[in-house]
Amino acid sequence: MEVSTHFGGSSATFELKHAILLYEDAGRAVAATTHKIANYHGRPTITAGQPITVSALEQLIQSLGKSSGATFLPTEILSLGIERMVWWCPAGRRRIWFKPNGRFDKNQSPEQAAETKALLKLNGQFVQWPAFLFVASHGLSAFAMARSERPKPDTHLLKAPCWNLNDGGMCAGNIELPSVSPDNLAGFENAFFNSSFTHNSQGGKLTTHPGGHTGLWTELAARKTAPDTSYWRKHLLRTNHTVQSVIKNHHE
């Protein structure tokens, strides 16, 4: 049966061929079936269906102009789906960049002015970063990890001690993120590590370090050797997320 409708702002004539039915339990999709459409007396009718298969999904993706072809996966990749990717990044010594929003505010309190001065002094310096877990989808999320090794599904994630993050989700500002692809891991990591942190978008504690956020990064700039696992566990806050829960449920 031909149907005249609008998709993506353009008008065209399409032939109704298949239907996909989703079955839910308490609002959560638990099964799907695919059905051919028959024309009975001029009316489209859904015929008996079959459980949807991976092959059927691949055909649907390809027909929608997406690619599901095989590709090389770097060892850092933990999960890869349609427009969603999770990977880990080892600890290392990298530069950190700050551009505090209040740097030109003459009405800052003495404490705020001191913090701004300290952060501007840190701007561009090399610091010791913890290992990270990244999630790329419609945006970029970042979590810290105590161990600099490929995590397991039950590995608990730590709050990244960074500004511009809210429950891990990065406020990218005017940074243009690359497309979600295993080829673009470096692009996403550059967007994170080379961005200028401007403000604490969470408003709460980012670390248990006695010197707070600024004290932690000042110490990490002074260190020439990488902190061990116990250091990160002592100074970074534990989240309610595990690697598995982030893969399944976290959205940016």
Image (spheres, rainbow, N blue to C red):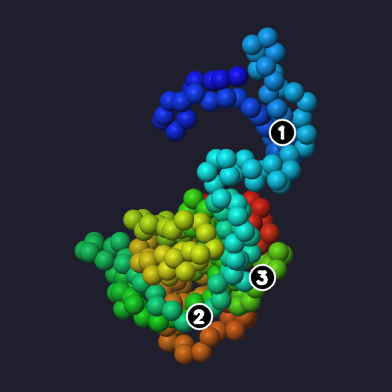
Residue at left offset 72%, top offset 65%: 154
Under circle 2, the secondary element is strand
**Circle 3: residue type:** Pro
In terms of sequence position, does the residue under pointer 3 or pointer 2 come before the other? 2
Q: Identify the residue at image location x=67%, y=32%.
A: 20
Vertical order, 193 against 170 (above or below)? below
The extreme top residue here reads 41
- Residue denoted by label 2: 92
Q: Which residue is mark 3?
A: 151
Residue 80: which quarter of the image?
bottom right
Amino acid under disc 1: Thr
Residue 35 in the image: state x and y as whole percent. 72, 29
Quadrant of the rendering where the N terminus is positioned: top right
Residue nearest the viewer, comparing 210 with 81: 81
Whichever of labels 3 and 1 marks the residue nearer the N terminus, that label is 1
Residue underneath mark 1 = 34
Locate residue 78, reporting x and y percent: 64, 64
Instruction: Report the amino acid beneath label 2.
Output: Gly
54 is higher (above) or lower (below) than 45: below
